[in-house]
Amino acid sequence: MRKQLNRPIDAILISGDIAYHGRKEEFDFALTWLKEELCPVSGCKIEDVVVIPGNHDVDRKAAEAPMHADARAMLRSTPISQANQAITRYVDDETSSQMLFKPIENYNRFSANFLCEIGFYNKDTGRKPYTFRDFTLSDGSTLRVWGFNSVLICDGKDGKDNMFVDPSAAQIIKREDGVTHLVMCHHPFGWLRNAGEFRDRIESVAHLHLFGHEHSLRVEDYRRFTRIRAGALQPSRDEAGWQPGYNIIDVDVSGRAHDRRLDVKIWVRHYHGTRFIAVSDHQGNDPWHLSHDLTPWIAPKVEASPIAPVAQIGAGPTNENTGTVMVDQSLTVRSVAIKILALNEKDQRRIITGLALDEEGDQGLLDYEFALAAVRRAFDRGQLQQLNDAIVNQPGVR
């Protein structure tokens, strides 16, 4: 597909069920596969992977305590009209929130590599009860990719109409000038007990909806939005109608500032025999072509500014001709985060304390949260290059 498209893939979106039993070794396998297989062959940077959790990413053994089961039963029995309020009380309290998110701790350790971990809000680590990522579209506007959590309450009693999406999903996403919204949620609306407000908001604001869970490749074209079912890349072979599949989505903007259109192409692929083949649209076309009206938007004018040398004192190797210290402009919080998380905890802490990137209050953070907090502080303090250099100078690090 990359040869056919004649370009690299910009981002990889995984709509849940990375693991099967939510075990650490399953996520370790997935991370290695992404780093060494999928990203290199697709041309996508590893830091441009965006993930959300599915029900198979839940470690159900981690929530067998009676108080966990009692909390889930209570929330599921709460009247629909009061469900969002009850869940919000749990999510907004650190202690009860930790209980709800404990079963996806292995997932969070994995998703931290992409800054997609979810949980009780923490400004130091950047963790929130949802995730989002911005990409730039062809006219300079923004494609905002949202990832919402539908496994807040997940156990052996999962079923249609008794899963819950985090209520913040219906509150945080809003119309913004120059922003096109793409929403990912593992469970489709029919599985969500509190789907009403969430569905109303998503269908009125977001032009692209990506769902997982139901292992059917399906594209639904509506006037205001397109809804895409992910299928499953690795469904169980015991599953009825076993058929691995995936989608490649191209998003572009056409027209002028006051007559903008979102143009969407979707290459739908499923496994047949020994290879993946095209699933054409109702007229037999591959790829699918869909289009939606966008609100008017004019790119803001950028004021010209004097060209300054790309340098920052103490941030990297010295240029022999100028005496300044040159900065690698490709470094981002994400690119450095994935490098430091690949180190063992001992080396992480030695580097972080050596650069004085630790602070009082870090004692309560898990090891990967401690590392992410340090990376964000390095960015805020202009030390990202120093931190990156200290990481890559470790033996065996590439």
Image (cartoon, rainbow, N blue to C red):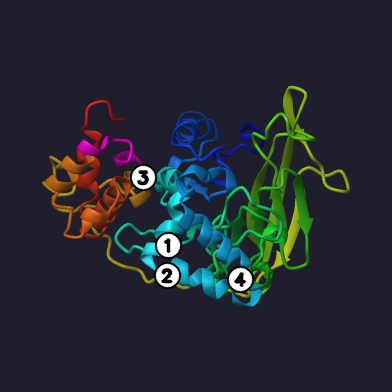
Q: Which class describes the residues within 10 Å of circle 4: few (<14), some (14-19), or many (20+)?
A: some
Q: Is residue 240 left or right of residue 329?
A: right
Q: In terms of sequence position, does the residue under pointer 1 or pointer 3 come before the other?
A: 1
Quarter of the picture holding the N terminus: top right
Compared to 178, does 148 lie above or below?
A: above
User: CA–CA distance between discs 1 and 4?
Assistant: 18 Å
Along the viewing direction, whichever of 122 and 290 lies nearer the viewer: 122
Spatial separation of the CA atoms under disc 4 and disc 2: 18 Å
Label located before the other in sequence (4 or 3): 4
Q: List the residue tagged with mark 1.
A: 97
Q: Which residue is mark 3?
A: 335
Q: CA distance from mark 2 to mark 3?
A: 30 Å
Q: Disc 1 or disc 4, which is closer to the eye?
A: 4
2 or 1: tag closer to the N-terminus: 2
Q: Are marks 4 and 2 in contact (CB under 8 Å)?
A: no
Q: Which marked residue is nearer to the observer: mark 2 or mark 3?
A: 2
Question: Magenta part of the protein: which range?
Answer: 338-347
Name which residue type carries label 1.
Ser
Q: Which residue is mark 4?
A: 78
The residue that disc 2 covers is: 92
Q: Please determine whether, in this image, residue 348 is positioned above or below residue 144.
A: above
| Residue 321 within the magenta-colored segment of the rendering | no
Inspect the image, locate mark 2, and give the three-letter code of the amino acid beneath it: Asp
* Mark 1 and mark 4 residues within 8 Å of each other at the beta carbon: no
Residue at the (19%, 43%) spot, across then down: 349
Amino acid type at image mark 4? Thr
